Amino acid sequence: SQQGEEDPQALSIQEGENATMNCSYKTSINNLQWYRQNSGRGLVHLILIRSNEREKHSGRLRVTLDTSKKSSSLLITASRAADTASYFCAMDTGGFKTIFGAGTRLFVKA
Amino acid sequence: NAGVTQTPKFQVLKTGQSMTLQCAQDMNHEYMSWYRQDPGMGLRLIHYSVGAGITDQGEVPNGYNVSRSTTEDFPLRLLSAAPSQTSVYFCASSPRLAAPGDTQYFGPGTRLTVL
């Protein structure tokens, strides 16, 4: 399968803690994006990191990319109950096709 | 500006029936795509289009047809529904996927059950 792999599959933390999820992929990429999906809804774009970037921040989100290891991580700092959702990495490999990981389900307990 | 809309939200079909899932966007995006999402899996690309009159296959195209007669609309047709097509279907659009930074905007999804 060309799908990216994410770990952990599920993560349960207390409000205020940090949440880290990881994504690994198999092919070369142009950029990598992270999406969020609330239960029963469509995906919403969070952040994009290009292949020549190593780290990017957006509010409480921090994304890193290591192209030599073909991996990325998403850190959500000071998690809130409203952050409860599934998070997906998505790899742009060129050729108009995006490959999605299987997702990490995050549950933040109030 | 409604973004990406999908109809219906829910649908139950019997094996062998055909139907069309509708998708429309009002953002004048060139790129549109259809994905299916199965439990415990990410999204898998079914078909995509880079502009009116241009479509191509994704990762799992078998059993599905698409057409793109206008920029706004990108319907997905199930020719003869099978239980394996039970899934949640998402439509997405993007200004131009080839340009770095062009994210995809997703519709709310259609939950399809094939009995």
Image (cartoon, coloured by chain):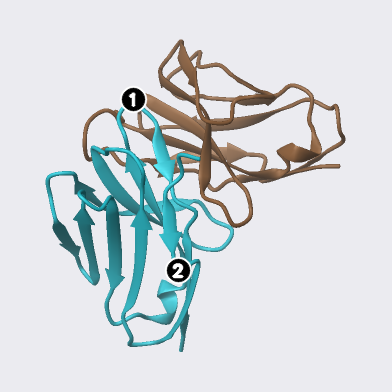
Chain colours: A cyan, B brown
Residue at x 54% of width, y 38% of height: B35
Task: Measuring from the top left, give residue B110's x and y in whole percent.
Answer: 64, 44
Where is B13 relative to A40, above or below? above
Dot placed on the residue nearer the N-terminal end, 1 or 2:
2
B72 over A81 or under it: above or below: above
Residue bearing mark 2: A8
Which amino acid, by three-letter code, is at mark 2? Pro
Q: Is residue A37 above or below residue A16?
A: above
Specify few, some or many for label 2: CA neighbours under 10 Å numbering under 14, 14-19, or 20 or more. Answer: some
Left/right placement of residue A59 relative to residue B51 reads left
Element assignment for label 2:
loop
Task: Please name which of the two marks, 1 or 2, marks the residue nearer to the observer.
Answer: 2
Q: Residue furthest top?
A: B53
Q: Position of residue B79 (x, y in %)?
A: 74, 21
Q: Chain of mark 1?
A: A
**Residues tagged by mark 1 and mark 2 found on one chain of the structure:** yes
Quadrant containing the N terminus of chain B in the rendered view: top left
Image quadrant containing the C terminus of chain B:
top right
In percent of width and height, residue B37 lies at 58, 46
* Label of residue B55 in the image: none
Task: Please state if B77 lies on the left or on the right of B107 as rendered.
Answer: right
| Identity of the residue drawn at 41% across and 32% down | B26
Tell me, yes or no, if residue A4 can be seen here: yes
Chain where mark 2 sits: A
